[in-house]
Image (tube, grey):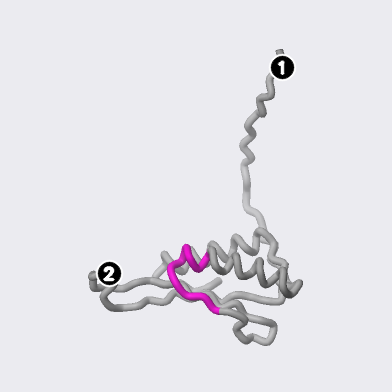
Amino acid sequence: METNVREFELERVGALDCKMDENTGVYTVINRVVIPGVHKGVAGERVEIRVDVMGWDDEPVRSFQGLAHDVRIRVARFLSEYRAETSLCHLSYEHAAYIGAEIQRAETDSQYVQS
């Protein structure tokens, strides 16, 4: 009797170089924004993330600011829409993952500087 059981395979992964797109037509500037004050009745600081999508002319194409999770989703959607509209911005999966990782670092690292 033959079964359709797929065998699981674990691939060990070593150090890999990230393939960044050189000619995407845009680049991102990611900043951590700390907002002091009272938020939801609690005094303290709220951390937001700002992502500026910049064009070749070093001028912002669009900027987004908010909670990291929300900004990450909106930037991904915008870049997908921008690609469809302009035939620019062909980001690789590695480049998209880098942007997401940088947004995560900006959220969690109080001394964040984009790398």
Q: Where is residue 85 shown, x and y percent of the image?
A: 72, 73
Magenta segment includes 66:
yes
Q: Are marks 2 and 1 in contact (CB under 8 Å)?
A: no
Furthest residue in direction top, as rendered: 1
Crowd rating for badge 2 (residues with CA inside 10 Å; few <14, some 14–19, many 20+) = few
Q: Where is residue 69 shown, x and y percent of the image?
A: 47, 63
Work out which quarter of the rendered image holds the C terminus and state it: bottom right
Residue 2 is marked as: 1
Q: Where is residue 1 shown, x and y percent of the image?
A: 71, 12
Residue drawn at (26%, 75%), measured in percent from left and top?
A: 38
- Secondary-structure class at tag 1: loop
Three-letter code for the amino acid on which mark 1 is drawn: Glu
- Residue 96, by quadrant, is bottom right
Q: Is residue 46 left or right of residue 58?
A: left
Q: Is residue 101 left or right of residue 39?
A: right
Q: Earlier in the sequence, mark 2 or mark 1?
A: 1
Crowd rating for badge 1 (residues with CA inside 10 Å; few <14, some 14–19, many 20+) = few
Q: Where is residue 10 shown, x and y percent of the image?
A: 61, 37
Marks 2 and 1, Cα distance to the nearest angstrom?
A: 60 Å
- Residue 88, by quadrant, is bottom right
- Secondary-structure class at tag 2: loop
Residue at label 2? Answer: 40
- Residue 90, by quadrant, is bottom right
Q: Give the label, 2 or 1, closer to the camera.
A: 2
Residue drawn at (27%, 69%), measured in percent from left and top?
A: 40
Seen in the picture, residue 10 relative to 3 is either above or below; the reply is below
Residue drawn at (54%, 63%), measured in percent from left and top?
A: 73
Q: Is residue 68 left or right of residue 34?
A: right
Residue 61 is marked as: none
Give the residues in magenta. Answer: 63-72
Three-letter code for the amino acid on which mark 2 is drawn: Lys
